Image: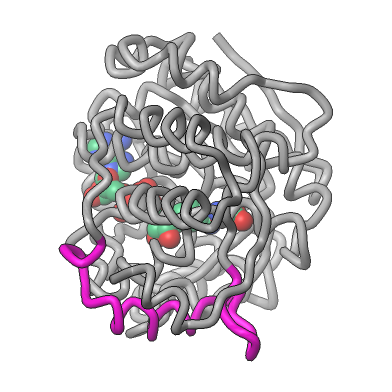
């Protein structure tokens, strides 16, 4: 099974398939033919897939796993290796791993020789439905998740769902965090057709956890169609693209407050979405029936709407939220549900939010 999507922004293709790995390898070889390549690969993914990937050691750089590795040290490692092997600005970097490897490699590629091409080979669900597409690249610094980064679109994205067979349940659920996000924003994405993502997700749980290929490819395809519609209209996030940050302002604060170690990105996004739904209901932006339906959709996949006080001190979260890229001197902009499958930006002062968090 194979599905190809096109992104007008930077004119690239995304292939979603359940092909065998030989086909993936030959697709990469033909796409990069005549170019020097640097494969930046997650150590863990490499251990699992080295026989399939069969990468020439001269073209390979392994990066340890975890959010704390999305850092300046590994950024320099990539640049140094690229120089060492003589990558020119006409060559290519290839990220193989989850969102950490994708964001890091994308950032390195965007600044190496003032910007070279990179390809995304996402191996987690989260990276397949979100981070490998749309060109946001970044590294973290203490207290500032993704605070150093660029917009740099990939040249191609090869999504092979067979990688998901070795992903553990926690990471699979983490990817669901970003998948569920699209259900709540579909009507705000300005995609010309309806994919009925909310309805699809209420029906696909069993098949999803069985890793049914048709379900996974459809889930990734729908998610990316919505994301592409947004990115093509607002690549640099001057307006519309903010809808993709639903759940993220609090999520980034949670990750940062817990030193990127306690919660995965997707788990933090789930808490951010519960928070946004609770706040929107409290402020009268959505009615009870939609609030319940939404909470049930998330809970049905096994997530719990727990008290934020159990996660971190509200004062601490607020301080971190004030560093959010959407924050202004007038307050914090939160993306909140305002109707069925629709969200909007709403500005609140730190005092209002802290009151609510408590
Ligand atoms: P990750 O990259 O840390 O991967 C999670 C874990 O899964 C790692 O331990 C990794 O070794 C393991 N793994 C990866 N592929 C595997 C496989 N096939 N089998 C077994 N294990 C595998 O985390 P993630 O959830 O993929 O990405 C999170 C990152 O993505 C965060 O840094 C977040 O900020 C970023 N992100 C970026 C964007 C964007 O638009 N650029 C969007 C969303 C998230
Ligand atoms: N993940 C949010 C965005 O790509 O804008």
State the residue at coordinates (40%, 67%): 252
> Is residue 70 or residue 283 the one in the foreground?
283
Q: Is residue 100 visible?
A: no
Residue extending farthest bottom = 329
Query: Percent position (x, y) of residue 157?
Result: 60, 39
Magenta stretch: residue 346 in it?
no
- Horizontal side, residue 329 vs residue 131: left or right: right
Provide the residue span drawn in magenta: 308-333
Query: Percent position (x, y) of residue 290?
Result: 52, 33
> Is residue 83 or residue 48 the one in the foreground?
48
- Horizontal side, residue 335 vs residue 63: left or right: right
Which quadrant is home to the C terminus?
bottom left
- Horizontal side, residue 51 vs residue 86: left or right: left
Quarter of image, res 33: top right
Tell me: residue 149, above or below residue 90. Answer: below
Quarter of image, res 6: top right
> Is residue 5 or residue 179 the one in the foreground?
179
Q: Is residue 223 visible?
A: yes
């Amino acid at each position: 099974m194979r599905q190809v999507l096109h992104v007008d922004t930077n004119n690239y293709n995304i292939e979603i398939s359940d092909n065998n790995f030989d086909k993936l390898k030959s697709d990469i070889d033909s796409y990069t033919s005549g170019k020097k390549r640097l494969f930046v690969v997650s150590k863990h993914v490499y251990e699992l897939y080295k026989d399939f990937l069969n990468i020439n050691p001269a073209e390979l750089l392994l990066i340890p796993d975890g959010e704390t590795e999305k850092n300046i040290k590994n950024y320099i490692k990539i640049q140094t290796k690229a120089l060492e092997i003589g990558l020119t600005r006409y060559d290519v970097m290839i990220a193989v791993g989850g969102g950490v490897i994708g964001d890091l490699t994308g950032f390195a590629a965007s600044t190496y020789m003032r910007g070279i091409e990179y390809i995304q080979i996402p191996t987690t669900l989260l990276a397949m439905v979100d981070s490998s597409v749309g060109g946001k690249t970044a590294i973290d610094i203490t207290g500032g998740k993704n605070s150093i980064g660029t917009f740099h679109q990939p040249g191609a994205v090869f999504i092979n769902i067979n990688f998901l067979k070795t992903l553990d349940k926690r990471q699979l659920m983490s990817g669901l965090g970003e998948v569920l996000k699209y259900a709540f924003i579909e009507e705000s994405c300005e995609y010309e057709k309806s994919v009925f993502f909310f309805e699809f997700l209420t029906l696909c749980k069993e098949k999803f956890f069985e890793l049914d290929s048709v379900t996974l490819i459809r889930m990734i395809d729908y998610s990316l169609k919505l994301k592409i519609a947004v990115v093509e209209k607002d690549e640099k996030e001057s307006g519309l693209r903010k809808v993709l940050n639903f759940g993220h302002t609090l999520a980034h604060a949670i990750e940062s407050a817990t030193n990127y170690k306690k919660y995965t990105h997707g788990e933090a996004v789930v808490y951010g979405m519960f928070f946004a739904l609770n706040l929107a209901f409290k402020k009268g932006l959505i009615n009870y029936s939609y609030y319940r339906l939404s909470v049930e959709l998330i809970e049905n996949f096994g997530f719990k709407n727990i008290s934020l006080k159990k996660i971190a001190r509200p004062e601490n979260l607020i301080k971190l939220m004030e560093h959010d890229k959407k924050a202004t001197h007038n307050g914090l902009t939160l993306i909140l549900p305002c109707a069925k499958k629709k969200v909007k930006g709403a500005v609140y002062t730190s005092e209002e939010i802290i009151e609510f968090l408590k």
